[in-house]
Structure formats: structure tokens, C-alpha cells
Image (cartoon, coloured by chain):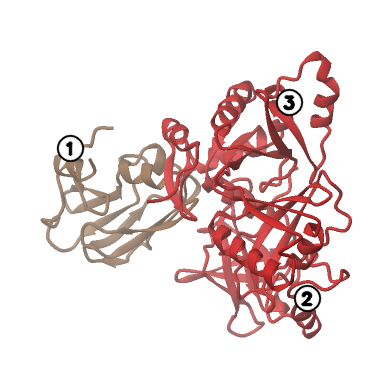
Amino acid sequence: MNQRTSLHSLHLEAGAQMVEFGGWDMPVFYTGIIDEHRSVREKAGIFDISHMGVFRIYGSGASKFLNFSLTNDLAGLIPGQAQYTIACLPAGGVVDDLYLYRLDQEDFMLVVNASRKERDLQWLLQCLKEHGFEQSVTIEDRSDEEGAVAIQGPCSRQILAECLKFSKSEMDLKSKMTSMTKNHLARFKFEGESVWICCTGYTGEDGFEIVASRELLPRLWKGILSTGEAFGISPIGLGARDTLRMEMGYPLYGHELNESLTPLDAGLGWVVAFSKEDFIGKSKLKAQKNEGLKQRAIAFKLLGKSAPPREGYSLLQPREGGDSETTGMVTSGTMSPSLGIGIGLGRVDPRSSTIGNRIEVAIRNRTVLAEVVRRPIYRKP
Amino acid sequence: MTLPEDLKYAESHEWVRVEADVATIGISDHAQAELTDIVFVELPEIGKQFEAGDACAVVESVKTASDIYSPIGGEVIEVNEKLVDQPELVNQSAFTEGWFFKLKITGFSAPDSLMTAEQYGEHIS
């Protein structure tokens, strides 16, 4: 049987349609994907993301270990800051894409994809052992005790500040929360219990991810929903989570990322800090960078009304006076609720990957014209 | 939602209304509710011939594409052009405004495998 988060019964009460995701029974939508998507873009939405894994990594060698095991550079990351990063195999393939939170100088929290949690843990423990960090670093899987909910959307800051019920003597704390900027985190109290509030998310909107004990999550969920009611908040399922991230061009493990693709293949070269000292995968990634990529990750949008692109559809390059040639494949696709047209992510021959290039998507027995676009695919007016 | 008594239903959730030698085809209210937000309907070309059970249209929700099978054989004589700009009509009124296409029935009338409203009601319960 699939695992259930501590919010499972609340999802059922709210009438959610449930689906299996990464071994968990999760809500795919409550009222409908498009409504939920719009709610996040226009007001606010709350997401159960407590299926994701939470690791704590600490000890005198923690920063050195993480800088060696993950591709991004944490040299400039001070306590209270977070960064997107990647765990690579020595051959360069992506074990997982993760979010690293620096809680203290040598104390870190790592939030990982639900479907990759066991693999991540096994891989990090293997790195620990093989590279001599066993004495100086502890990796703790906190996933059974801690989990997160996300509040995203233009009203999320106001809702969360109200929900935390700061007293008159805590106005400095309140302004600390409301002035938090992207990729920062701090400890706050909800109903007397400590929570980590992180200014991060997967929607492109302003918002927060709140890590708390699993027992606290249902109260936090209900608290945010009842405070947010006046703002028009809605609970959001995985369906809208997917359309929101696609509009931003964010990758999803298992679609844009896997162990046989490198971060460079996935267009995540900006997460690979070649300038730092040795790290796992560095020499292979450097070689790949020098040799050039066989395919490049792109975002695209369809130029006319059509059925939306779907994962696995072929992408074609039209040739003047000749037949179109296959240039790559769609890795994620949907009808963009914000734009009302089909959008997608894919990988193509580098010659097809320039912004503005016209390509074709093979949708069943026809081809539909599309344009390679810059990320995010959707930008708020 | 009560199921219209004058329609016949397929196991794959299409409905058909037969009037003389013309069959109107759509998907059931149950099917639209399962699919949720319908964002695109690919309709067959006029003049195309189908046997009962042929894949003849595609309905796309935000998440997935689903084939629609013709419950009856015939030649396409009309499609619901409104669905091109308003695919949500299928969500709003699956049994009326949200019809997909009309066939001129070429073979026999509806196959025996089609269900009555009562039988279909049991099928989806």
C-alpha cells in the first residue's frame, strides 16, 4: 500500500482525487487543476509536500562533505540561506535535484524528491564512507518525523504572517518574516512549536515552504487555510503543481532528469560550480562541457491552437524545401492554464535549441508549429 | 446527475443518440467528471468512415489525452465546431451542448453491446 502523509485524511475530507506519486497516496486535485493553478497565480494556494524526504546533515566536516558531494557551491551560503543543488554520480548522471538549507555553520537540511529518497540516502552514505567523512559527518533521515507544506502565490506572505499570530511585542519578528527574500530561511513558532520557514517554492510565485513536525502539519494546514480563506486560498494538488512548474520551465526528476542525463544535458549548468575544488562528477562534467552537448534542454510553446504536447512526442526541425527531421523529444508537456496554449520542455539537437527557433511537435498524425522560448515560459504581465 | 433515458451508452463511456439514420455521439457526464478540465477536443474529419469501436476522436484534459471510440458505425456528417473554442462545454453539459459529432449510420442500428441508461448507471456505480 502507498504511504500516507499526516494530511491524508484532510485531503479526503476536502474531496481530493488521489493518485500514486513516488510511493505516496497524494491529492492530484481538489476542485480542478485549472482553478487551482489560477488560485496560486492570482491569490494563494497551499500544497502538501510532506511526501518529500528531509535529511539533516551535520558535524565538523558537513560543509566540506556537501561541497564535495553536491554540484553547487556553498562557499557563499551563510546560515539562514538555501540553494538549489544536484547530486551527481562520478559519471555525471543526476542522482537527484535537491534543496540545501544551511541552518548553522555545520548544520544542514536537505529536502529531496519523494521518489528518490532511498536512493539519495544510500548514495550520500556511500559518499560519506568512500571519501572518509564517517567520523566528521552525520546524516540523519528525518522524514518520519518532519515534513513540509508550501504556501505559494501573491497573498502568501500576508496569510502566513497573520497565521503566525505575532503579538505586539513580536513586531520585529513579524517584519523579519514579511521581509524574507528568496532562498532565505529562519525559525519561527506556530502554536508554540518551532518551524522552519523557507522562502522557496516550485511555482515561480512568492511563497514559503514550512518544515515542521509531522504531528504539527495538520494544525498548520488548517490554520493556513482558515486564515487564508479571506484571501481566497485553495488547497492545491499535484496536477496544478505540475502545470505551475512547467510554466516556469523547472525540471522534474524522472522527466527532465535521470541517472543517465547530466546536469548539463538538463540545462542546469548554472547549478554546477566548476570554479570550486573537486567534487563528484566534476571531471566528467568538465569533459562534457568541453566536448559540447549532443542535445540541449529547451522550453517551447505552441504557436497555434492545438492539442497540448505530451512527454514522449517527437520534436522535428523543419528544413527548407524538404521534409522535417527529428531533432528531439518532449520531456514534459501540458496545456498552460495561464497562456491557454500548449507548452512543454524537451531535449533537441543543439542546432534546434536557439531561442526563437521554430520547431514542430508531432501530435498523433499531424505536426504543430512551436517556438523555442526563454524560461520562464509564462511571465506575469 | 440523472442519465438521459433516450441515449445508449458504451462501456468506454461514450453515449449515442439515434434519430432515424443519424447518430449523435458524445461522452458521458461521468467521463467528463473523471477527466476534469477538458482543454482540447480533436474531432474527426467530415466524410470519414468508422466501424463501431474505432478510435475516432481525442479528448485532452490538462493531464492526459484519451481516445474516444465510436459506439456505432457510419460516416461523419457533422462535428460540434463549438468545441474548438469551448472545449469546456463537454465539462459543462456532456449530454447536450458538449456533443462531439454526428454519423450517418451505414450499417445496422446500435450494436447489442451498448447499454441502456439503467445498465450504464450500474456500470459506473
Q: Earlier in the sequence, mark 2 or mark 3?
A: 3
Quick one: label 2, few (<14), some, or many (20+) residues within 10 Å?
many
Hue used for the chain lettered B = brown
Which of the 4 image quadrants contains residue A229? top right
Alpha carbon separation for disc pair 2 and 3? 42 Å
Q: Position of residue B56 (x, y in %)?
A: 33, 62
Q: Position of residue B118 (x, y in %)?
A: 15, 39
Left or right side of A274 for A366 = left
Q: Are marks 3 and 1 in contact (CB under 8 Å)?
A: no
Q: Is residue A176 above or below residue B115?
A: above
- Which residue carries the number 1 mark? B5
Give me the disc on residue A170: none
Give me the disc on residue A282: 2
The mark closer to the camera, 3 or 1, is 3
Alpha carbon separation for disc pair 3 and 1? 54 Å
Q: Is residue A304 above or below residue B30?
A: below
Kind of residue indicated by mark 2: Lys
- Which residue carries the number 3 mark? A161
The answer to whether residue A223 of the structure is visible from this angle is yes
Quick one: label 1, few (<14), some, or many (20+) residues within 10 Å?
few
Q: Is residue A24 above or below residue A163?
A: below
Q: Nearer the viewer, residue A332 or A11?
A: A11
The mark closer to the camera, 2 or 1, is 2
Residue depicted at x 48% and y 40%: A32
